[in-house]
Amino acid sequence: MKTRKVRIGSLHIGGGTPIRVQSMTCTKTKDINTTVRQIKSLESAGCEIIRVGVPDMDSAQAIAGIKKKINIPIVADIHYDYRLAIESIKAGADKIRINPGNIGSAEKVNLIINEAKKRKTAIRIGVNSGSLKQSTAAALKEKSGNKKADMMVASLLEYVSFFEKQDFYSIVVSLKASDVNTTVAAYRLFSQYRDYPMHIGITEAGTELGGLIKSSVGLGILLHEGLGDTVRVSLTAAPEKEVYAAYRILGDLGLRKRGVDIISCPTCARTEIDVISLAHKVEAMAIKINKPLKIAVMGCSVNGPGEAREADIGIAGGRGIGIIFKKGSMVKKVSKKDLLRVFENELGKIVDGKE
């Protein structure tokens, strides 16, 4: 879907730009050094936009110190207190996230808009299913068939119209629910009314496994339909894993190429090695590699290389031995105890461009 382009610090969202990957810190924002360390780690993982929680004035003011030490745009997440939004903008936030419904009066929202205009700060208007303004969806010409999704869109359109009346258009929108069907229905419906760039995600998706499944289903549907300009995979896990998951989803849909794609076989009676353990160790080894590569982990040294012929490099186990293969051809045969060490060395050659 063609959306308008909105500037977020040194980047843009929408307007045909790459789908941006973002995450959120889980540190106390007012602890500048700890927060910067986590952001640096996320930068290394490929995070392009970082959001920080702003529960108090100390956190809002800390944004100025954080911004000096990081290399990616910073977003302030605000709830309830309009003064925190204004202070975050003054401190240099590249974007703020608010739900106007919990900020209070129109006058307070307008004060935020005026400050954002002055400093050319973007605003994400975020509507969550759990914090809906009690408005009716009856006025919508188009409906989704999902009552909660209709209410979410009606609320968001009301907020967007208010911002537009204040001549403010540096808007990013989000319509998140913890339910996949509601989230998908809401984004689909909103896209029929406005062309603002969409921040997509399944809110409060769950743990590393359950949340990843739910997020992959919901985000996969939206992205496949052309909806979504920036994405956060919300997991109850380390934020670096959110970034890794986002790139894997985008990569599997052919939308962005970054990092390693690991293909691994399920276990069966033919395996002569602990494939599950081996695959996890290879994944841990490769998770910080930025270069687009395909790595195979196979349990059968006879059929494995042929089945994973498209992999740039692969590893497979046999009875008492292991093999390293590249593009389907065996390059080394080693003992099981040396397998991972030799594989890491061969992988390093590819990453460093020596092969």
Image (cartoon, helix red, strand yellow):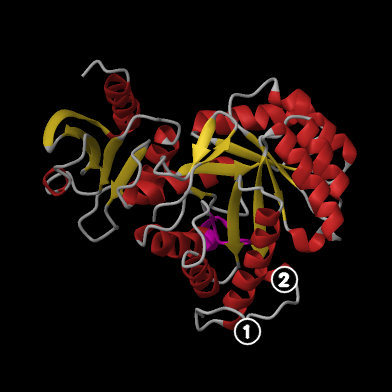
Q: Position of residue 128 (x, y in %)?
A: 66, 65
Q: Which residue is mark 1?
A: 138
In magenta, the rendered stretch is 199-211
| Quadrant housing residue 312 | top left
Q: Which residue is mark 2?
A: 132
Q: Is residue 201 magenta?
A: yes
Q: Residues within 10 Å of mark 2 (few under 14, many from 20)?
A: some
**The N terminus sits in image quarter:** bottom left
> Of residues 95 and 129, which is closer to you in this image?
95
Residue shown at the point (75%, 46%) measured from the top left: 113
Q: Position of residue 326 (x, y in %)?
A: 17, 32
Horizontal placement of 145 versus 313: left or right?
right
Q: Position of residue 354 (x, y in %)?
A: 24, 15
User: Which SS class for mark 1?
Assistant: loop
Horizontal placement of 168 versus 33: left or right?
left
**The C terminus sits in image quarter:** top left
Q: Amino acid at mark 1?
A: Ala
Q: Amino acid at mark 2?
A: Leu
User: Which SS class for mark 2?
Assistant: loop
